[in-house]
Image: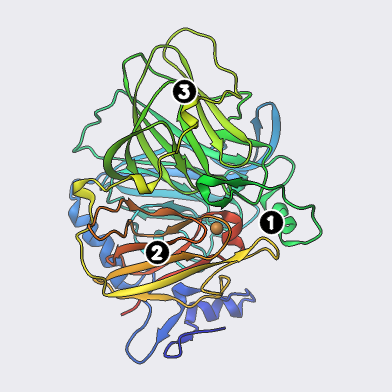
Amino acid sequence: MPRRPELDVQLSRRQALRLGAGVALLGFAGACSITDGTASAVEPDSPQARAFAEAKARQFPLGKRVEFDLRAAPEEVDVGGARCAAWLYDGQLPGPILRVNVGDRVRVLFRNRLPAESTVHWHGIAIRNYMDGVPDVTQPPIPAGSEFTYDFIPPDPGTYWYHTHVDLQRGRGLYGALIVDDPGAPADWDAEFVVVLSDWLIGRTPPQVFDDLRSSTTEATPEMTSPALGGDAGDVVYPMYLVNGKPPVDPTTFMARPGQHVVVRIINASDDTAFRVALGDHRMTVTHTDGFPVEPVDTDSVLIGMGERYDATVVMRDGVFPLVAKAEGKGAQAFALVRTGAGCPPNPTVAPDELRGQPLTIADLNAAEGARLPTREPDTTLLATLGGSMDPYNWMINDQAYPEYTPLTVREGQRARLVYTNTTAMYHPIHLHGHTFAVSRADGSGPRKDTVIVLPGQTLATDIEANNPGQWITHCHNDYHLAAGMATIFSYVS
Ligand SMILES: [Cu+2]
């Protein structure tokens, strides 16, 4: 495999042990030692990585201890009258909303009762590396029947989520919202809607879909295109799209009162679907994305890729209104009701006028004053070229399919510019673990994000304060693209 000539990737003791146990492993980054005579990889549970968490703890001396139990297991779930086999957290689709305060010492006892190994990833949290939940990078996967205690301090308030990071498990139902409140900034809204969007298979599992995508014997995927996504809109047609685990025929109902200020926290937990989201007869004011504040912008609709979050505030009118998440380019939608008064519910196939215009994207957003990264020349520029195609079904970064990769190396304290270039015909929502980068702009106005849509043909630069040592995966949040190998490691060395 191609590799920077000066780097010599060696097996560590832990990787050697796993290989000795007969486990095929190519990319145990967390256990790789990168040596060029001067630099070696900062390991996930090293003193340097732990120091980050200890510094965070000192920053929040009043943080409370908060404990959760989270049990993953196979369950049957009712989706619009269909009994579906699923893998769920605590028997719920989506999993329970986990709610904490910024600075809390959060301990989650994860019980893996799945018939497979698993992990939990805390998406968007600047977590300490060992708790990031990426198998073979930050921790060994948690075996079936075992437990693991995740222990972390969320350092930033906002809308986050959690999900498995193993082998196409997410699409079976293993995802939920993680809300981090700031007790120092009391809510200025009257009600809250947490909107978890997902795409849902019936009668097929994600691994079966992946096998179909990879085999050339299946019927051609129908054409799915979207101008807003710059080309291909997805790889998979789904029978259902869900809001909080409910299909349009049996919708979730959100309740509020006329005149109330409501915050809508939109989380796209799907595998292969971007959504265009609108609330009928209302305008939304977008206030945050990926947990971090932006200069408020009014819009009719937002376009949200897999892994992204948008918070919007809405002043409620009187009646019953459709909350529609159009599966972009796929000819179907997720649907929920918002009820503030009397009235007949709209039809689940309703197309509110608000969906017609251009949806809001990151190009319309500026970071709020206090959330801007100071402008600074990058110390290092790292390139991630996104490549691949539908036929053959291959997706990669820098011509390597993960778990084969050449790490993108950085040193603690550096300002890194990580540049994603999309050479494919499809958009990719790219996620970086452990950091909230700034979308790179000369004036420093770029919104803070941890997941960002990179359109076909687009080059998108991100600026990162390298202040969280460890080994961090960056990958496409299309779960099929990740499974095919569209990932690499943002690797701290010292
Ligand atoms: Cu992708």
| Amino acid beneath label 3 | Gly
Q: To which residue does mark 2 refer?
A: 130
Q: Residue furthest top?
A: 342
Foreground label between 3 and 2: 3
Badge 3 element: loop
Residues packed near mark 1 inside 10 Å, few (<14), some (14 to 19) or many (20 plus): some
- Residue at (28% x, 43% y) in the render: 294
Drawn side of residue 455 relative to residue 419, left or right? right
Is any part of residue 337 visible from this angle?
yes
Give the label, 1 or 3, closer to the camera: 3
Can I make out residue 93 in this image? no
Q: Is mark 2 within 8 Å of ligand 1?
A: no
Q: Is residue 232 above or below residue 283?
A: below
Mark 2 vs 1, N-terminal side: 2
Question: What colouring method underlies this structural image?
Answer: rainbow
Q: Return the residue at label 1.
A: 210
Q: Amino acid at mark 1?
A: Phe
Q: In the displayed structure, does residue 171 sit left or right of residue 453?
A: right
Task: Tell me the residue that label 3 is attached to.
Answer: 280
Q: Quadrant of the C terminus?
A: bottom left
Residue 302 at x, y = what percent?
43, 38
Measuring from the top left, give residue 161's x and y in whole percent.
Answer: 43, 45
Q: Residue at x 67, y 51 (%)?
A: 206
Residue at x 71% of width, y 57% of height? 213
Cβ atoms under marks 2 and 1 closer than 8 Å: no
In percent of the image, x 42 and y 90: which residue is there?
Answer: 6
When the figure is inspected, residue 251 is found, relative to residue 50, above or below; the finding is above
Q: Earlier in the sequence, mark 1 or mark 3?
A: 1
Give the amino acid at mark 2.
Tyr
